[in-house]
Image: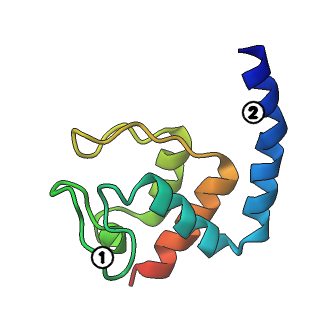
Amino acid sequence: MLRFLLVAATLFPVALARADDFPQIDYGRKLVEENCSRCHAVTSTDKNSHPDAPPFRTLSRRYPIEDLAEALAEGISTGHPDMPEFVAAPEQVDAIIAYIRSINP
């Protein structure tokens, strides 16, 4: 277990450095593709695979985007019943919000 923690602690800064290499919107797109696309439509044209998951391109019609930042930082635990809790780090929140703004009219 200690070995795992040491490896994880060593790799974590590398993951953050990679995030800084991407423009913010691209990093946000990558995050939502990895964490949300299993159920949500996360691009401007794809379709939901879960009927209760709103497409990201319509989120601004349902919620003020600035309110989503707080929810992402504190942990989204509501939504559709199958949705797992999701908590994002501050730099991830900024990137996700930048991406959502980029695909919302």
Q: Are discs 1 and 2 less than 8 Å apart at CB?
A: no
Query: Looking at the rendering, which quadrant does residue 93 occupy?
Result: bottom right
Horizontal side of 71 relative to 18 (left or right) equals: left
Q: Nearer the viewer, residue 92 or 69?
A: 92
3D distance between C-alphas at marks 1 and 2: 34 Å
Q: Secondary structure at mark 2?
A: helix
Residue at 30% across, 72% down: 58
Q: Secondary structure at mark 1?
A: loop
Query: Mark 1 or 2 closer to N-term?
Result: 2
Q: How would you rate the neighbour count of disc 2 (Cα within 10 Å): few for under 14, some for 14-19, many for 20 or more?
A: few
Callout 1, which amino acid? Asp
Q: To which residue does mark 1 refer?
A: 46
Callout 2, which amino acid? Ala
Horizontal side of 11 relative to 56 (left or right) equals: right
Q: To which residue does mark 2 refer?
A: 8
Query: Looking at the rendering, which quadrant does residue 98 occupy?
Result: bottom right
Q: Position of residue 4 (x, y in %)?
A: 73, 24
Q: Position of residue 75 (x, y in %)?
A: 48, 39
Q: For the N terminus, which image quadrant? A: top right
**On screen, residue 89 above or below 41:** above
Q: Nearer the viewer, residue 103 or 47?
A: 47
